[in-house]
Image (cartoon, rainbow, N blue to C red):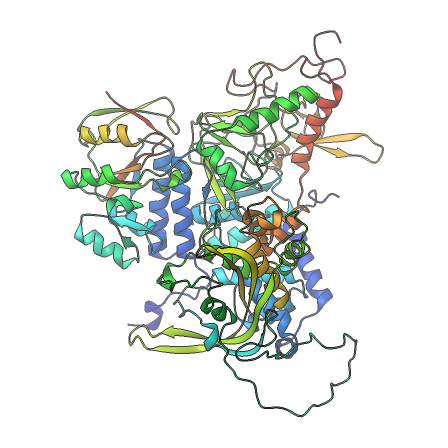
Amino acid sequence: MGYVAVRGGERAILQAEAFFRWLNGKPGMEFLRQLEVHLPYLLDRVMGEGSLYAPELAAQAIAQTGGDLYEAVLLLRAYRTTQPRLAYAEPLTPEAMLTVRRISAAFKDIPGGQVLGPSLDYSHRVLQPEEPPKAPAGPPAALHFPRVADWHRLTGLLPIAPPDPTPPSAIPDLTREPLLFPAPRAHRLQALSRADSGGVLALGYADMRGYSGAGGTHPTVNEVRLAYAEVRLRHPTTGAVFSAGRVRYSQAEVVTKFKEVNGKPGLELGFAATLGWNEVKLIAAAMLDAAMNRPDGHPAHQEEFVLMHTEPVEASGFCIHYKLPHYVTFGSDLDALRRARSEEAVE
Amino acid sequence: MSLARLTRPRQDYTYAFLDAYAKRELRRRILKAIAIPGYQVPYASREVPIARGWGTGGLQATLALVGPQDVVKVIDQGDDDSVNAANLRRFIARFAGVRTTTDALEATLIQSRHRIPEEILGRQQVLVLQVPIPEPLYRVEPSYAQARELHAEAEYGLAWLDLYEALVRYRTSTQGADYPVLVGGRYLMAPSPIPRWDTPKLHRAEHLTLLAAGREKRLYAVPPYTEVRPLEFSDVPFEVEDQRGWIDEALGVRNKFMTEIPLPDGSVRYRVSDTGYARKLREGRAPGPTYFDDTGAFYIAGFLAERRKLGAKGKSQSEKPM
Amino acid sequence: MMVPSPQELQDHGVFRALMWALARPGEPQPLVGGLEAVGRALLDLETRFHTPDPALQRAFLRLGAQAAAPAQADYLFLGTLDEAALEAVAQAPTGSLLYPEGGATIALVGRTGYGPLLRLRGPGIHEEVLVQLGLPPVLWSLRAQRVAFPLGWDLLVLEPAPPGWLVRAIPRSVTLEVV
């Protein structure tokens, strides 16, 4: 009884799915709510890669797939394509966001201060930790912070870019157009935003370690920001701008040195942002954003290599497609191989 | 005036799953692909509820084409009952409400992974081939951006060199399935991993062939009556797989593409890969005329070179003494 | 049971007719409507079109499509071929070698049995097709200048055939000779 020789292929696949569901049990509504409350970073990762901000749906996707994140991301993406496009939100400005965490490695202190926010960065990585001792609370941190990059712009180290007049509806959209190279900046940033966290980390790490002959880009984290961003829409008839709610949003900027700015050596900015909070991915992605402009042939410095191979749905799908029957192709290849082995071919 | 008359029954999805924008974009791209035979048209390739790499391109093409009057056949490796084909067929039937069939001649639309049926397809039929790697130059030029430049200039020297090096090294082409072809004398095309047996079926066909790669976001087309010629040197002609000695004992059939089924004692059994064709024979229904007749001759005389003589043991032998 | 809406059915029918028309150049395919039905099936906010006809213009703008000058249009809908329409054809984009699909699709209204006799050969055509489309000879000399495979535009020639229409296509892949 072979993989394909199974009669009633449809019956087999229905049974396979039923088996999966039976093995993993049926999670209830309460469980989904608990997922949302206690595992927000898991949801953030899936929403960021899924390009769909919908915590309830993300929780459902994770539960329905038994925690298989690639499957969960595919569920969200497939769901997303069925949704109509109603409107375009107003562009976000980081200074205006309700920011809970904002740090910079470039300076000891920065306008607005270094605000750790909720973070495990300095915790002891011990299973079953004790409650940290309650320290007396100081004055509350601000909710809004200026951009560190703006300080660089004031001092001439970063170029001042004029505001982009492109209306949101005219911005190239990776979810509706194929990715062609060299990619417009919008496509590059969108691709990084929904890229596979592990894939981005691997390539970013290769660049960080300087495994590229040119010594890597030696970046410095200019700023990492975790915030709640308002989704602001224009009313279709009155034109009034209103908030449709808040989403978790994060962004990272890195700077590398010795790029030409107005004829003098200056800084180059690498940038990445995503829905939800995902620092590891963003720092690596921001570094790749800067690294992809390098002219050498290192894979992490080539836009086509980085963006094509960090696409989670395409990569995981193609990977598991190798499980599909390939016996016809294999048979054809065997024929060619046998002929070559028989040495009875071209004289 | 009743509410029932003003409303339609609830449908949580649009017909054929894809929303209107996705359908229109696909249809615009398909029309351009037909106008430029063999050229890979980039398209958005939205996600669908099937994993990438599992036929999302072919599925999108089918969903853009399908209408309620269509009859759809879905095969994988030639087999209607393959789990993957069954899954895609289930999806199409569910979202397009169409009748499905295993009969290649009854279908108006055939979605296939890696095979072209044995029976000759006709002028009202569309064949949709699932493509994993749409770029025929990928082995010699990994960057799709660079490959685009080569196609623009019809600069295919690297592909010829690749074939030449295989001939010099192995005295035969090493390309099994997905054998590169030149379409309309202009574009080098990857016909998808169909065996070489199926490659000639694209040449001056009666039917329309669409090829779609969902993950790589390219689709292309071969209209009817289009020249499709495998890459070959004039003194080393293209050859299909040598299965001349193979017999499907269960059907008593020769000279139709077969797959090998290894047996525990090390021997092998052969089975016709086109299960729709096999089924007709088993049920005593006459199949239609086939691309390769029972002697193994291709239906377009002279298109394939004479095969080398068959040796005593059913294996091909060179006529010249070693 | 999935059922298409009447608009979906119409758009589907138009698409299938255009598909076969381009796949078999010169062969007529039935259409339920004319230029407007073709636009409705293909246009939306991701496309740019040009038409001199104010009614078509209004209809297509309502679909969200963007009106553009002939040189920037993906789709041109031209009724009778007057001076202005021929000028639009002369300016219609022909794509680039890197992206030949940038060449426009031009929809015209013709009349079989009139005008120069054309011999069509190439992909989609068994041997050759002989046809008269009732379009002025200057169009064919324009085509000879502007269309050189893979560059060029793709023609859709519509003709009223009450109660519906017919469409024949001449994609850029066709070699066209005025007999």
Say if residue B80 shows up in the picture: yes
Q: Residue furthest bottom?
A: A136
Q: Is residue B2 above or below residue A8?
A: below
Residue A291 x, y percent position in the rendering: 57, 54
Say if residue B106 shows up in the picture: no
How many labels were placed on the picture? 0
Q: Which residue lies furthest to the front in this view?
A: A264
Residue at x 65% of width, y 21% of height: B167
User: Which quarter shows the N terminus of chain A?
Assistant: top right
Residue at x 75% of width, y 31% of height: B269
Q: Residue furthest right?
A: B265
Residue C25 x, y percent position in the rendering: 33, 31
Q: Which residue lies furthest to the top in this view?
A: B321
Q: Is residue A283 above or below residue C158?
A: below
Residue C126 x, y percent position in the rendering: 38, 24
User: Which quarter shows the C terminus of chain A?
Assistant: top right
Q: In this view, does A142 lie above or below A226?
A: below
Which of the two residues, C161 or A111, is positioned nearer the viewer here? Answer: A111
Which of the two residues, B82 or B71, is positioned nearer the viewer here? Answer: B82
Residue A46 x, y percent position in the rendering: 60, 65
Residue C163: quarter of image: top left
Residue A76 left/right relative to B315? left
Residue at x 69% of width, y 76% of height: A120
